[in-house]
């Protein structure tokens, strides 16, 4: 049906073009990473409050008609959501969508990497904060490193490329492994991305209370200095995948890349933001680190038209803040990372 509202490109009030949606398909997870979820889990949103896969696909179809080009499925752990392969297929068949990717802890990837690739998934990002099995179990509270490595191997075998590894750097937790992890890019063609720990305070407080881990913030510049001190100068590198916030480098002669994602220390981080998020319970969240949200579920469930959905998407776009303003004391307080889709 033709739109009765003026077709407007997805440009926000600060002239950023928003072509990327990160979709949290569930708030549930099979792990309990110390910086993300408390040991006992979180009170999960009741099933009926979670968007159905059809509802998610519809929002994506409508947004694709407005200029959305790339979708990343995340969570919680997206692979615990039943029907995820169907969702990938539907998104892949949506006119306008050029790229579908997935962020996962990879524990369940061995059994579904091939199916996901066949359905249209292009790439995966795998969270991996340590190469030491004992430490991995401590950080994730229940993860199994060999299973994750099998998941990465399955992704590669299925042609999901490049594999990106997300490493949240935490002082006193894994900062002694920075060089070791960076060195793996010499022989592996993966992209290791060192991510600054973000202040989802409640998690970090429960983690300090419940475990002996006290994750501290480490700025990207310090991570880079450590790597260069041990392995030599990093050469800036270009990538054609993602268009995301990572700044990439390569060790001389290395097969893989090293990236830095610096939401806290990089002044220009927000100026190039190209994304919005859709939470599992149907809210568009224009900024990961700001609690402002626009509800889509009510519009969907009250029989809203595609035009109504477009209006809601534009409302979200128009409320996207210029920056996260963490430096001015802003903190995300309403939701945990696993409930937003990091
Ligand atoms: N379960 C999937 C996974 O772990 O990849 C997807 C969801 S998880 C919330 C997405 C990403 O957010 C992961 O790479 C995780 O490391 C990151 N993350 C979670 N809490 C974070 C925090 N406080 N600071 C920085 N990154 C965080
Ligand atoms: Fe689960 Fe991912 Fe959060 Fe870890 S980071 S608890 S794997 S959602």
Image (cartoon, rainbow, N blue to C red):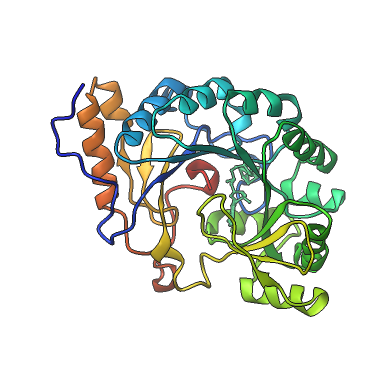
Q: Is residue 52 above or below residue 239?
A: above
The image quadrant of residue 191 is: bottom right
Between 194 and 214, the residue placed more toward the observer is 194
Residue in the picture at 46% in, 34% down: 280
Q: Is residue 229 left or right of residue 120?
A: right
Q: Residue 324's x, y, as percent? A: 40, 63
Q: How many numbered circles does the render carry?
A: 0
Q: Residue 177's x, y, as percent? A: 80, 64
Between 334 and 7, the residue placed more toward the observer is 7
Q: Is residue 213 left or right of residue 75?
A: right
Q: Is residue 324 something one can see in this rendering?
A: no
Residue in the picture at 75% in, 76% down: 228
Residue in the picture at 82% in, 76% down: 230
Q: Residue 168's x, y, as percent? A: 66, 58
Q: Is residue 231 left or right of residue 47?
A: right
- The N terminus, quarter of image: top left
Q: Residue 147's x, y, as percent? A: 81, 36
Residue in the picture at 53% in, 57% down: 200
Q: Is residue 271 something one can see in this rendering?
A: yes
Q: Is residue 289 left or right of residue 236?
A: left
């Amino acid at each position: 049906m033709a739109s009765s509202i003026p077709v407007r490109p997805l440009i926000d009030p600060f002239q950023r073009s928003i072509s990327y949606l990160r979709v949290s398909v569930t708030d549930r997870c099979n792990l309990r990473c110390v910086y993300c979820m408390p040991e006992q889990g979180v009170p999960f949103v009741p099933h009926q409050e979670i968007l159905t896969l059809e509802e998610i696909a519809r929002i994506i179809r409508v947004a694709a008609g407005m200029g959305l080009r790339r979708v990343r499925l995340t969570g919680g752990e997206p692979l615990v959501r039943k029907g995820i392969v169907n969702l990938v297929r539907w998104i892949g068949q949506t006119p306008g969508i050029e790229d579908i990717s997935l962020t996962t802890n990879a524990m369940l990837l061995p059994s579904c990497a091939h199916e996901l690739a066949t359905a249209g998934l292009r790439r995966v990002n795998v969270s991996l904060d340590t190469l030491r099995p004992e430490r991995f179990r401590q950080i994730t509270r229940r993860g199994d490193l060999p299973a994750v490595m099998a998941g990465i191997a399955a992704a590669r075998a299925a042609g999901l490329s490049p594999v990106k590894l997300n490493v949240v750097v935490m002082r006193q937790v894994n900062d002694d492994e920075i060089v070791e992890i960076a060195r793996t890019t010499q022989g592996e063609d993966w992209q290791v991305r060192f991510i600054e720990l973000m202040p989802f305070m409640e998690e970090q407080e429960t983690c300090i209370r419940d475990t002996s881990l006290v994750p501290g913030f480490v700025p990207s510049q310090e991570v880079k200095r450590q790597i260069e001190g041990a392995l030599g100068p990093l050469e800036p590198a270009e990538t054609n995948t993602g268009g995301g916030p990572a700044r990439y480098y390569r060790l001389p002669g290395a097969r893989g890349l090293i990236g830095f994602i610096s939401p806290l220390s990089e002044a220009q981080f927000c100026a190039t933001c190209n994304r919005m998020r859709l939470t599992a319970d149907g809210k568009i969240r224009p900024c990961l680190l700001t609690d402002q949200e626009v509800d889509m579920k009510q519009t969907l469930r009250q029989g809203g038209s595609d035009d109504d959905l477009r209006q809601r998407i534009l409302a979200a776009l128009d409320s996207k803040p210029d920056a996260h303003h963490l430096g001015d004391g802003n903190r995300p307080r309403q939701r945990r990372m696993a409930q937003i889709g990091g």
